Image (cartoon, grey):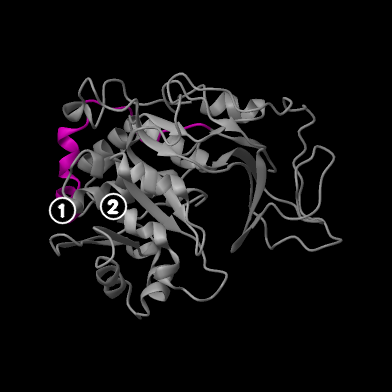
């Protein structure tokens, strides 16, 4: 597994002795992502479906924690990791923070299929992992550790701990008390949002939005919440509610508006050969959080977030494919030596020259490979 390029800390110039022990506080569920590639169609009950490739990796909040850690930030996941595969990856190479002591929760599976995902669906395999009836199964016969009560944390005795930033997932009608507490403690809150199953798409139903520094929905979510038919117009409407509104545009890139100054920035997506988009949104948020905490210009933050997300989709999984500085440096070296790159791309990412080492390993790099097996 490749790790971060030594010595690169994007917040080095901003750090002081009295700073919080963690840069970013995270809370959420850790999934065990089981990824099948090469499926010709979604599994059908009563039939067998053969996948040409299969992999597993920590998912859920693990995507964000690992992505931030590989960019040099100290993170504090809000839950203890159960199961040796998850704990070994996230608390081993690389560590997700200093003194992490989150509370116990069971890990849950996720099956990614073409066009949709199934989360925690009904039906159980012999190892206790839920899966849809008739779907391909991954079986791990090793028992996990028994559940234990939360233990006091000598580094983070209070929840939420003092941090530079926190990442929240907003849900209609379900405010999280810790969000307001973290904001009062000085943390910048970065929030995304999921699909509104109620169909109301009411921003007033997201009371925690008032505590947020940045809101990062995708284009469809942004337009539905703002009753607009253009994602850029939606971003401007959201900027009336939050200081930073960032709308991801899929293959078109991303668009952001600074509600304090009215400045807007748009960065096109980087064209890559995508293998697996799992966790790309989490990696995008991690990149944007990093740039914001480092006080980069808005356009640079947006470009960096898009770059980290683009690099992540070229490998399996969400957490294990999150790029570190070694991968970013290798990509930038390739761009500068490739005649096919447009001058605009070289200009857009020139800010990397001040961040990256003069030498880098050759591209492409292979990051952590969670693949279990392939059919030839």
Residue 173 vertical placement versus 226 (above, below): above
- Asked if residue 357 is among those painted magenta in the image, a careful observer would answer yes
x and y, in percent, of residue 256 in the image: 25, 61
Q: Is residue 322 among the parts visible in the rendering? A: no
Q: Quadrant of the C terminus?
A: top right
| Mark 1 neighbour class, 10 Å CA radius: few under 14, some 14 to 19, many 20 or more | few
Residue 319 vertical placement versus 274 (above, below): above
Per the model, the C-alpha gap separating discs 1 and 2 is: 33 Å
Quadrant of the rendered image containing residue 182: top left
x and y, in percent, of residue 265 in the image: 20, 61
Residue drawn at x 72%, y 25% as measured from the top left: 145
Quadrant of the rendered image containing residue 262: bottom left
- Comparing 323 with 275, the one in front is 323
Residue drawn at x 40%, y 57% as measured from the top left: 208
Would residue 235 be found to the left or right of residue 122 on screen?
left
Question: Are dots 1 and 2 in contact, CB under 8 Å?
Answer: no
Residue drawn at x 64%, y 30% as measured from the top left: 82
Would residue 306 be found to the left or right of residue 199 on screen?
left
| Mark 2 neighbour class, 10 Å CA radius: few under 14, some 14 to 19, many 20 or more | many
Lower position in the chain sequence, tag 1 or tag 2: 2
Q: Which mark is residue 12?
A: none
Q: Which mark is residue 213?
A: 2
> Over which residues does the magenta segment extend?
343-368
Q: Is residue 50 among the parts visible in the rendering? A: yes
Which residue does the numbered mark 1 point to in the structure image? 343
Secondary structure of residue under mark 1: helix
Would residue 375 be found to the left or right of residue 206 on screen?
right
Would residue 325 be found to the left or right of residue 83 on screen?
left
x and y, in percent, of residue 249 in the image: 36, 65
x and y, in percent, of residue 367 in the image: 46, 32
């Amino acid at each position: 597994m490749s790790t971060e390029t030594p010595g690169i800390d994007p917040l080095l110039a901003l750090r002081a002795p009295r700073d919080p022990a963690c840069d970013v506080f995270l809370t959420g569920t850790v999934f065990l992502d089981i990824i099948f590639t090469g499926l010709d169609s979604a599994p059908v009950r009563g039939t067998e479906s053969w996948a040409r490739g299969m992999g597993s990796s920590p998912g859920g909040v693990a995507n964000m924690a690992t992505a931030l850690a590989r960019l040099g930030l100290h993170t504090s996941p809000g839950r203890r990791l159960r199961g040796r595969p998850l704990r070994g990856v996230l608390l081993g190479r690389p560590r997700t923070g200093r003194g992490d002591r989150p509370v116990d929760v069971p890990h849950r599976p996720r099956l990614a299929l073409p066009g949709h995902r199934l989360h925690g669906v009904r039906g159980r395999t012999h190892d206790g992992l839920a899966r849809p009836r008739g779907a391909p199964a991954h079986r791990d016969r090793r028992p996990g550790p028994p559940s234990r009560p939360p233990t006091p944390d000598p580094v983070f005795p209070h929840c939420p701990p003092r941090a530079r930033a926190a990442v929240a997932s907003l849900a209609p009608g379900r405010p999280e008390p810790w969000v307001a507490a973290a904001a009062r403690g000085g943390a910048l809150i970065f929030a995304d949002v999921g699909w509104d199953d109620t169909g109301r798409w009411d921003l007033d139903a997201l009371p925690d939005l008032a505590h947020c520094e940045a809101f990062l929905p995708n284009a469809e979510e942004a337009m539905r919440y703002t009753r607009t038919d253009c994602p850029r117009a939606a971003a401007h409407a959201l900027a009336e509610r939050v200081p930073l509104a960032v709308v991801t545009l899929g293959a078109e890139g991303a668009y952001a508006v600074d509600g304090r100054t009215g400045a807007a920035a748009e960065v096109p997506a980087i064209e890559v050969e995508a293998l697996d988009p799992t966790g790309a949104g989490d990696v995008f948020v991690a990149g944007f959080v990093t740039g914001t905490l480092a006080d980069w210009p808005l356009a640079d933050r947006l470009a960096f977030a898009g770059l980290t997300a683009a690099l992540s989709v070229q490998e399996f999984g969400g957490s294990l494919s999150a790029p570190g500085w070694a991968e970013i440096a290798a990509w930038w070296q390739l761009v500068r030596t490739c005649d096919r790159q447009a001058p605009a791309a070289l200009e857009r990412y020139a800010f990397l020259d001040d961040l990256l080492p003069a030498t880098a390993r050759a591209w492409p790099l292979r990051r952590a490979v969670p693949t279990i097996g392939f059919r030839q």
